[in-house]
Image (cartoon, grey):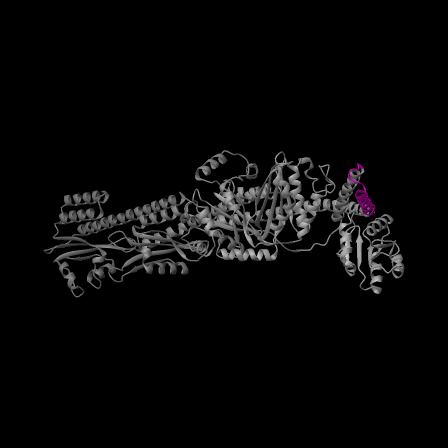
Amino acid sequence: MVNPLHTYDLLKSIVQLSATPLPIHVRLDRMLQSVSAAFQLDRCFLLRPEKIIEDGFLSRLVSEKKPLWVEEGTSFRKENVLPEEEGLLCPTFACIPLYDETSFQGMLYIGFSKPYHFSPQEVELLLLMGEAMMGTIRNDHLHQKAEETISELTAFYEMGKAVASTLKLGNLFQLIVTTGLKILKAKGGVLRVEDKKTRELEVKWSVGDYHQYPLDEKIARRVFFTQTPLSLNHPGEENLSFSMLCAPFLSKGKILGTLAFYDKDSDSSKFDERDFQLFQMITNQLSFAIENALTHYEISNMAQENEKRVAQLSSLWEFNKALLTTVNFERILQLTLTAITIGEGLKFNRAMLFLVNEKNRTLEGAMAVGPDSAEEAGRIWAALSQRQGTLSDQITQLNPQGHSALNAIVKGIQISLEQGQCILSRTVLEGKPFNIPSSQSKEGRLQTQCERGCHLGSEVGCYVSEHLSRDPKVYSFATVPLMGKGGIIGVILVDNLYNQNPITEKDIHFLSMFSNQAGLAIENAILYRNLEEVHQELKETQNLLIHREKMVALGELSNSIAHEIKNPLVSIGGFARRLYRAIPDDALEKRYTQTIMIEVARLEKILTDIFNYTHDESIAFKECNLRKILEDSLSMTQSRIDAGGVKLVKEFPEEIPQIHGDYHQLRQVFSNLIGNAYQSMKGQGMLSLRLHPIAKNGASFVRVEVEDTGGGIDPQNLHNIFNPFYTTRDSSLGLGLPIVHKIITSHRGQIEVDNQPGIGVNFIITLPASEKGRENRLKGAEADQ
Amino acid sequence: MKKILVVDDEESIRFLYKEELEEEGYIVECAKNGEEALEKLVAFQPDLISLDIKMPVMDGIEALQRIREKERHLPIILCSAYGEYKQDLTTWASDAYVVKCADLTNFKSIIRKLLGLS
C-alpha cells in the first residue's frame, strides 16, 4: 500500500516535472522514476506507439482504449500474448494506454515481481499518473508544433524580406535558392525559368551540382509541363539515391519556371510530407515575386531600349539638321564623317568615305576624318569634351582637317569594283555591311587573299591593314554601303584604332541608319555639284557662241574686204615691180618704189592670214611626228637665235607617240609660238622647247611646251590673247595666237598659258596621240614588262 | 611667138599681165569675162589661157568647162585672189592653180613650164 506521504511526494514531483522546461524524454523518465519509487515497483516504463507490436495483447488494449489490471486473484489469458510480449507478464502488472482526444501516445506499464493487489486509491493514482504523462506529452507536442509554426513563419518572413529586398533578377534568384535551402535544410537547389524566345527551361541559379544530373532536367520539364509539384524519394542504387522536391512557379495560370531542392542536410536524408507542404507554400508565395521581377526586368529592358532609340533618333535628327545647312559636296562629306567620329555621335575613332565612279567602275577615296596618332587622338578628344552644345552645333563648328595624313592616304586609294575579294568593293557589290573583328576571323581571311591576289595598291585589304593600322594583326574595322536613291553610291569604313573598342552589331545597325541619311545628302550634293558644273559649262558655251557669232560676222566682213582689196593690191605691187625694174639703180625713186613693193607684200601676207582665219580650210590629217614639226618650225628662227643672245634649250625624248594632224597647220602653230617667244625676249633670254608623252584618264597624249623669259603677259591682257586683231606689238595684226588656238582646237587639243608676269610665259599644248601612236606605246609598255 | 589669152574682170590686172607677159615675148590678148574669152578663142587661137575665177557674166569655172569642151589640150591656168578653190573638184580640169600675187615670178615660170619653154 502506498504511503500517503509518498502519494503527496509523488503528486508534488509530477506537478513540478510537468512544469519544468526539461526535454520531454527527461521529464517522462523522471516521472517514471517517481512512480516507481512511490509504488516500489520492480518495472516501470512507457512504451512508445511504434513499440507496440500488432496483433499482440498490447495492441488489443490500444484498440480497446482500456487499461489492464492483472493482480492477485485475477485471471489473465495468455493466448493473445506474442512471444515478444511474454517478458511483460509479471505476477502483477498494469498497462494504461495514454490517449489524448485524437491519438494514442504510448502505454504506461508497471510490474511487480510478487503478487500484489491494487487498492481503488492506487488505481485512481496510477490513472492520474497516466493522464499527467499524457498531458506532458500533449503539451510537448503543442510546444513543438508552436515552434514549428514559428519557424515556418520566420522562414516565410525571411523569404518575404529577401524577395522584397530586390527587383534584380540575379539577386532574387540567388536569394530564393539560398533561403529555400536554409528553410528546408536541403543540400542543393536549382531554379529554372522559361526563356520566352527559345521556350526552353534555363538554369538561373543553382547550389550544388545536382542540375548536372540528367534526371534532374527531366523531372523539372515534367513538373513544368504538368504544372504539378513533385516529391520524389528515389531509393535506387547507393550512389543514385536521392530525395527531391520540385514545384512549378505559377502566376495567374501562367507557368514561369520550376524550383527544386535536393536531399536533407540532416540525418534523415529524405524530405517528409511537412517539408513538401512547406516547399509548395514557398513556391506559391514566390511566384508573384518572380513574376513581378520578370516584368520589372522586361520593362526596364524596354525602357533602356527606348532610351537608346530616342538617343539614336535624336542624333539622326541632329545630323539631318546639320546636313540641311549646306549643299556643298565637300562640306557634306565632312559633316557625315565628323558625325560618325564625334563623341556625341557614333564615337568611332576614324571614318573614311569612298565613292563609286560608275564611268571607270572603280571605288575612289573621297575623304577621311580621324587623328593621325594616338597622341593627337587624346588631344582632340580632350578638347571635344570641353565643347558645349548640341551635336548639330558641334559638327557644324568643327573645321575641316584636309591636311591630315589619313585624308591624303584615303584620297589616293582607287580600287576596281571587279576586285571581288576586296572588302570595300564587296560592300558595294553585295550591298551589305561587313564587321571585320580581326585578321584571325573568317571574314578577316579575305585580307590574306587580297594580299595574294591583288596587284599592289589596287585593293583594300592591303590598304586597310597595311596602311591604316600600326599593327595589322590586331586591326579590326567595319564597312557599310552608302545608299543613294538609285542604288549604292559608296562605302563608309570605320575603325577604333586608338581605343580598340569592339565594334558591335548594334553599332553597325546605327551606322547603317546614319549612312542611309548621308547617302541621300551626298547624292543630292553630287547632283547639285553636277548641276553647277553644267550651269558653268552652259555659261561658258553661251559666251563662246556669242564670241563665235561675233567672229563669224567679223570674218564675213574681213573676207569681203580682203577680196575687194586683193586685186588692186596685186596690180599696185605688180606695177611697182615694173617701175622698180625700169628705174636706174642710182635714182632716188628706186627706193620709193621698193617701199611700195615691201608694204604691198606685207599687206598681201595680212590678207592671206585673214583669209586663212576666216576660212575653215580642210585639214589634211596624217600621222605626224611632232618632233619633226618642232624642228622644222624652229628652222625659220634658228639662224636668228644662233646669231643673237638667246639661248635655246630643247628637251626632246627619243620615243614620242605619233599624232594625227595636218603638218602645215601644226608647223604654222609652232612657228607662230616660237616667233612670238623670240620676239618677246628682244635678243636676250632663254627659249625652252619641251616635248613629252603623258597619260590622262587612261588615254595617251603628247605635250609640247614653248617657254620664254620675255617678261610674260600683262595679266590685264591675258584674257584677250586669243581674240583676233588683238596685239601689243605695232608690227603685228594680232592673228597669230587666234590662229594657233583655232588650229589646236580643230586638232582636238588643248592650249594652256602658264603666265608669270615679269618673268616669262609658257604655252603648253596637249594633243591626243593617234590610235597608231597609242598602240605603239602600249606595245612598248608590254615589251618593257 | 606663143599667144596667151588673159581673162580677168579687173582692168588693172589685165593691163599688168599684158605688160609683163609681152615683155617676156608673148603675144597677149585680153578678155574681161568668160563669155568674151570664148568669143576670142576662135579668132585668137591662144597657146595658153590665164583664167580668173571670180568674174561677172561668166565666171572662170564655167568658162573652163566650156573651153575644155572644144580645146581638150589647151593649157589653162586658173587664178584667184586666195586659195579658196584649191580643193574644188571643178578646178581640177585646169593645168595649174595660182594665187594672185604682186610678184609674178611664180606665175611666169608656170607659164613657161606649161608651154614647154623652160
At 24% from the left and 60% from the top, the residue drawn is A238
Return the x and y of residue A277 as percentages of the image width and height: 35, 54
Query: Hey, which residue is sitting farthest left in the picture?
Result: A114
A760 lies left or right of A56? right
Q: Is residue A581 magenta?
A: yes
Query: Hey, which residue is sitting farthest bottom in the picture?
Result: A79
Q: Is residue A354 above or below residue A683?
A: below
At 20% from the left and 45% from the top, the residue drawn is A14
Closer to us: A360 or A523: A360
Asked if one can make out residue A346 in the rendered structure from this viewpoint, the answer is no
At 86% from the left and 49% from the top, the residue drawn is B15
Magenta segment, prevailing SS (helix, strand or loop): helix
- How many numbered callouts? 0
Closer to us: A660 or A180: A660
Asked if one can make out residue A647 in the rendered structure from this viewpoint, the answer is yes
Closer to us: A46 or A722: A722
A298 lies left or right of A66? right
Return the x and y of residue A594 as percentages of the image width and height: 77, 40
Q: Is residue A191 above or below residue A722?
A: below
B68 lies left or right of A625? right
**Magenta residues, as a range?**
A565-588
Q: Is residue B111 magenta?
A: no
Return the x and y of residue A95 as percentages of the image width and height: 19, 56
Closer to us: A582 or A257: A582
Return the x and y of residue B6 as percentages of the image width and height: 84, 54
